[in-house]
Amino acid sequence: MNETIDDLLPGLIALRRDLHAHPELAYEERRTSGIVAAALREAGLEVHEGLAGTGVVGVLRRGRATRMVGLRADMDALPMREQAERPHVSRHPGVHHGCGHDGHTAMLLGAAQHLARAGGFDGSIAFIFQPAEEGRGGAREMVKQRLFDRFPCDAVYALHNWPDLPAGTVATRPGPLMAAADRFDIVVRGRGGHAAQPDRTPDVVLAASELVAQLHTIVSRRIPPMQSAVLSVTRISGGQSHNVLPAAVELTGTVRSFDTAVQDTIEQAMRDIAAGVARASGAAIEVEYTRYYPATINHAEHAQLALDAARNAGLEAQLAASPAFTSEDFAFMLQQRPGAYLWLGQRSDAHAASLHHPSYDFNDDVLAFGVRWFVAMAGLALHDSSDTPRQP
Ligand SMILES: [Zn+2]
Ligand SMILES: [Zn+2]
């Protein structure tokens, strides 16, 4: 089996570097999804295009079983400038495959090509290539467009390359693996006026400052110590002059957590604090709180299967000690179907950069590991039982 996967590698490396050189932003992955659809068709799969715009699903059927497993990759790049010298550096200024989705796409395609040739499973596999993982909810959009009605997967699996783990190692855990991501946008409004007459208008700069300080007490004072959450204020803007009190100041930030009850507590605390500061300062304060990605929660049994598949694929499989505070829109698929998400180690001396770093590049040495894991995952989920006696 490994021999034939190895045969695919030169083509997969070339493909991965070609995708890296031609990165596309969320919902604009037209070139990428065209390449994916053509390669799936050439491998003999049934191909469905246009889900959530640029999403592609390839279906492979073998044997007689009616069960179906979903394997998912993301295709989009980030709106950031790549800072590195390499032959396959981004040709699109300001767009960079800084999260390795070029590698994810190449690995899932390689698994489809291999499984189409080698079979070894009984049932159907839906190879799901989604757009817009980076903050734009491509998975949510595919689910909304009835992904799992059209492709009734019994379980879904996905992986992400993981620079914190060495190449050849994978990790996951039952329960939460990635955080829920919320954003807040707060506007503090007064009337504005002369800086020498602060008694005539609510001081929105001072009110915003109090708000920043008090928001940072939410996690430490309202969340039980054994639970975890992060709240960061990431932008504050208002005012243009040294002698004018502005009429409004805006604040933006993010909240990460693993549990809906914690999210509820934080949102409520934020609204309470805003109301208190508004009352004390005389400013009007509007809070917009948006929950955009839920936590990625692995189903226990499927997390175990994902680790078993990794061992079957010759990888070192670890139980992740704790979840990560980054987030992932595969969470929307896991809300609909049981399954698991896996971290695929990618670190080497030449590949030490973190995800979303301007010099990040996917490590081509792990292409084979990812393909083997997807293949082993399909094998475990749809093991061929034709050689065991059937029940009468
Ligand atoms: Zn990312
Ligand atoms: Zn990513």
Image (cartoon, rainbow, N blue to C red):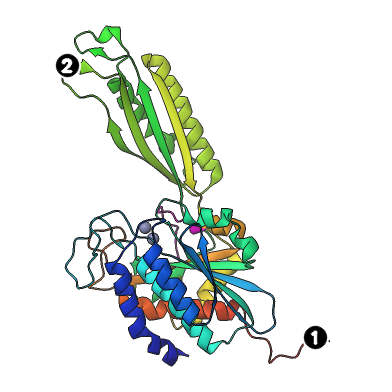
- Which amino acid lies under the numbered mark 1 shown in the image of this protein? Gln
Q: In the structure shown, which secondary structural element does the residue marked by tag 2 occupy?
A: loop
Q: Position of residue 330 (x, y in %)?
A: 50, 59
The mark total stands at 2
Q: In this rendered view, identify the residue nearer to me: 341 or 5.
A: 5
Q: Is residue 192 above or below residue 297?
A: above
> Which residue is located at x 32 percent, y 22 percent?
248
Q: Does residue 270 show up magenta in the picture?
A: no
Q: Which residue bears the numbered disc 1?
A: 391
Q: Quadrant of the C terminus?
A: bottom right
Q: Position of residue 146 (x, y in %)?
A: 61, 57
> Which residue is located at x 69 percent, y 89 percent?
386
Q: Indicate if the residue with disc 1 has its beta carbon within 8 Å of ligand 2.
A: no
**Ligand 2 in which quarter:** bottom left
Whether residue 227 appears in this view of the structure is: no
Q: Is residue 191 above or below residue 230?
A: above
Determine which of the numbered discs, if any, sits on residue 243 in the image. Answer: 2
Q: Position of residue 86 (x, y in %)?
A: 19, 71
369 horizontally vs 260: left or right: left
Q: Earlier in the sequence, mark 2 or mark 1?
A: 2
Whether residue 71 appears in this view of the structure is: yes
Give the dominant element type of the magenta stretch: helix, strand or loop: loop
